[in-house]
Image: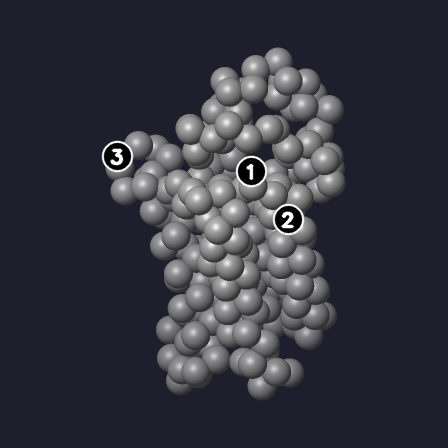
Amino acid sequence: MTTLLKIFLPIYFLLFFGLAMFWRSYIAWKRTGFNPYKLGNGDTVHDFVGKLFRLTLIVAALIVFVFSFLEGYYHWLSPIIWMNSSMLIIIGIALLVLALIWVLVAQLQMGDSWRIGIDEKSESALVQHGLFGVSRNPIFLGMLVMLVGLLLILPTAATLTVSALGFVLIHVQVRLEEDFLAEKYGENYRKYQMSVRRWI
């Protein structure tokens, strides 16, 4: 199974970053003429969280790279031996696949409203259909599931740290976006909050 994982994980991350980040950003830009990437390099909480989350994803990708191509250095990541389990690996793979599909579907359902970060100039309508009728933050939920899946497949102290940091950063980002949406959409968003859970 290790050999298959060394093939699967790099391909998965290429697909995740390629489809969910770069390709989706390109499609949104072509359709609207605006760059959907709204995480800047300023001194705001929003931009700081964005920088840390980018770093988190990069480190997660590096963990996969070490596992797949630098096996001799994998022990430096401090493997958590008691979590090594074929069943956990299978569950982790299932979570990764589910997370990617879930995120892509949510992005499609957002249409031209999709952004990475907070877009204060956006005039798009509040999306409440599809997965957004089940979760107010389906894309972030998918990313949380992805981090859990990666931890189950590659249980190391490094992966645990990345997952924990990602968990905290996503929760902070969600609350920043909720405050923005409540101010932007007012009573309409507050009704949405009352009818749909933050996660699921």
**Of label 2 and label 3, which has the lower sequence position?**
3
How far is mark 1 from mark 2, CA to CA?
A: 10 Å
Q: Where is the N terminus found, in terms of image quarters?
A: bottom right
- Disc 1 marks a residue whose amino acid type is Ser
The residue where tag 2 is placed is 108
**Residue at mark 3:** 43
Residue 178 seen by the camera: yes
Q: Position of residue 87 (x, y in %)?
A: 72, 70
Tell me the element at label 1: helix
Residue at 71% across, 42% down: 131
Q: Position of residue 30 (x, y in %)?
A: 48, 51
**Foreground residue among 194 and 72:** 194
Would you call the spot at circle 2 few (<14 residues within 10 Å), some (14-19), or many (20 or more)? Answer: few
Measuring from the top left, give residue 191's x and y in whole percent: 68, 18
Look at mark 1 in the image and give the residue it sits on: 113
Mark 3 or mark 1, which is nearer to you? 1
Amino acid carrying label 2: it is Leu
Which quarter of the figure has residue 3? bottom right
Between residue 124 and residue 178, name the one nearer to us: 124
> Does residue 113 appear left or right of residue 131 in this picture?
left
What kind of element bears circle 3? loop
> Which residue is at a point 44% across and 44% down the rendered structure image?
33
Measure how far apart labels 2 and 3 are at the Cα level: 31 Å
How far across and how far down the image is residue 100, in percent?
Answer: 62, 59
Dot 3 or dot 1: first in sequence order is 3
Q: Earlier in the sequence, mark 1 or mark 2?
A: 2
